[in-house]
Image (cartoon, rainbow, N blue to C red):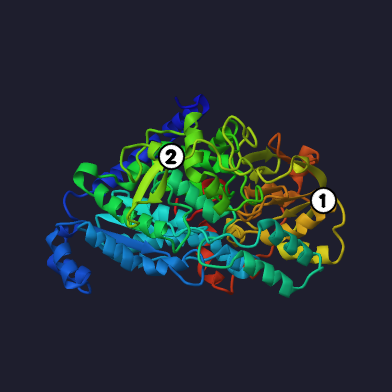
Amino acid sequence: MVHSKVQAVTERIIQRSEETRAQYLAQVDKAHIEGRATEHLSCGNLAHAIAASPEKEKQLIASGRGPNLGIVTAYNDMLSAHQPYGTYPARLKEAAARCGATAQVAGGVPAMCDGVTQGRPGMELSLFSRDVIAMSTAVALSHDVFEGAMFLGICDKIVPGLVIGALAFGHLPSIFVPAGPMPTGLSNAEKVRVRQLYAEGKVGRAELLEAESASYHSAGTCTFYGTANSNQMLVEIMGLQLPGSSFVNPGTGLRDALNEAAVEQLAKITEPSQHTPIAHILTEKAFVNGVVGLLATGGSTNHTLHMVAMARAAGIQLTWQDMADLSEVVPLLCHVYPNGTADINHFAAAGGMQLLIRELLSAGLLHADVHTVLGNSGLEPYCRDPFLNDAGDGVVWRPTAEESGDTAVIRPVSDPFSHHGGLQLLEGNLGRSVIKVSAIKPQHLKVKAPAIVLHNQDELLQRFKAGELERDFVAVVRFQGPQANGMPELHKLTPTLGVLQDRGFKVALVTDGRMSGASGKVPAAIHMSPEAVEGGPIARVRDGDIVELDAEAGVLRVLVDEQEFDAREIVQCDLSGNARGMGRELFANMRAIASGAESGASILY
């Protein structure tokens, strides 16, 4: 039986979304056609679509005897997580041929890495790349020659963008094909230690680069539990990937076998008797399951934006309040860096997604009666581990272990790390924001200190180097929202604030920008809404104002007389420096029309 609070939130979302969901499903029904897509093309259209295909594939596509599957790929070889995708299309095509189908690369989408652009002008393009990816996905599939689609993407904005784009073609059965994390390298604790030493000037750039390179050292996703690996958790718990496929390393036999099995499964669910379009997978219940997974694992705060935007693409009205209400009853079951010292490989070895889903199902915290890429079999199959078969050329699934392999990484619902989820909604006279509490030590959950008001992150770093921040303070970094400069991550501040916190000072961050999915040690009230450029209350804060952040009570406020605070002039900021350079001029129109953080910070919905 589903937990009463989970059920109540789900029913509330369904009711709130009744009109928009009905409109979306009507759009999906209108787009669905019986028979093969190529049957509805003119001969000229079809000839263009298969002109470059091998003769055997030409004949099969033209005959309509098997499904034609589109591949949308985020491959590039500069980013470790996406480098493995370079070899995928050929292998996926071979797997399709073995099951009587064909596959074509429909198109590519951009894939940028926040780890490369942190603290640089390019970071101001990062969030908007999600909507560009969604539009690129739509362009790739717009030729309307496919019965199903495979999506090759894994990192930060890429997966949410692919999901939004896929939902625009909600009539198509779709499956996500991950590449997996890189093997474990330098421990996260050691990496953080060297970063902080560098921030203090105690080691040089050579030592820092050595540590970073030992951490990020090969093909695959970064091993910490940031946005990329939160993406993988989400698409699996929401039923868009095969069970247990998220965290299998690249270049292994099991990884290859799972990829081939994904093609076979997609071909199956394109058939009329098993037809399972993505619109029927990503329902209100699926999105609630995704939020529950995010809370139970202490996932990336970026998904308080992405989940809202993805849901809207499916006609579903998901809110921060829904997430906050679920957080009251969903326990924190996982400690993976930055919430602990273990990495994602350790998480997988300790039981991974299969153990997590089983625990949440047993407590009634997930909806079991959902469609997935396996069809209408619900979430129970996601409690099984994938293994190579005896011949080593296929996958078999077996029941997962009864207990966690390491309770320092995954715990049962009966003994959680916390009875509250990993995210918290903060409210007060500064507006509304979110905070990741799963990685914050209890003594840092409450901060009351004078504000230091800044209009960019470099100001704080300069003041730190000048020795001006040896005290308690709340850094209010404003004009970092979607309309101001594209809402960059401010992860560059984490080592510096961490150093000051370790020196015994009470410090916190308040911003209308974002923080990295890897952040969390220092209390950070982020995604402040309304943002400063919209005249939000954060634009009234002055140096020296006492700011109270209480993550336990869900309170964020400035302790100033209410009438005096409301009467203050709203500070303006010269944003012309955000307008040009590093491609930022191409995104001016997107900044102008971007919605607020609570609406997903999107230009699309």
Residue at screen point 17% across, 63% down: 61
User: Does residue 304 appear left or right of residue 17 in this picture?
Assistant: right
Report helix, strand or loop for mark 1: strand
The relative height of residue 461 versus residue 539 in the rendered view (above or below) is below
Choose top left, top right, bottom left or bottom right for residue 109: bottom left
Q: Mark 2 points at which residue?
A: 383
Coordinates of residue 316 in the picture (x, y in percent)? 42, 41
Q: What residue type is labelled 2?
A: Cys
Nearer the viewer's eye, disc 1 or disc 2? Answer: 2
In this rendered view, identify the residue nearer to me: 334 or 319: 334
**Who comes first in sequence, dot 1 or dot 2?**
2
Graded by Cα atoms within 10 Å as few (under 14), some (14 to 19) or many (20 or more), the crowding at tag 2 reads many
Q: Which residue is drawn at 17% across and 60% down?
A: 38
Q: Position of residue 533 (x, y in %)?
A: 64, 55
Give the answer, above or below, for where 374 lies relative to 490: above
Relative placement, left or right, of 276 versus 244 is: left
Across and down, in percent, residue 556 comes to: 72, 41
Taking 591 as reference, is 261 left or right? left
- Which residue is at the front of the view, 388 or 490? 388
Looking at the picture, does residue 53 appear above or below residue 573?
Answer: below
The answer to whether the residues at label 1 and label 2 have Cβ atoms under 8 Å apart is no
Residue 371 placement: quadrant? top left
Q: Distance between the residues labelled 1 and 2?
A: 46 Å
- Residue 166 position within the rendered picture, expressed as x and y whole percent measured from the top left: 36, 53
Q: Say whether residue 256 is left or right of residue 413.
A: left
**Which residue is identified by label 1?**
473
Residue 183: image quadrant is bottom right
Split into 4 quadrants, where in the image is the N terminus?
top left
> Regarding mark 2 in the picture, which secondary structure is present there?
helix
- In the foreground, 169 or 403: 403
Residue type at tag 1 = Phe
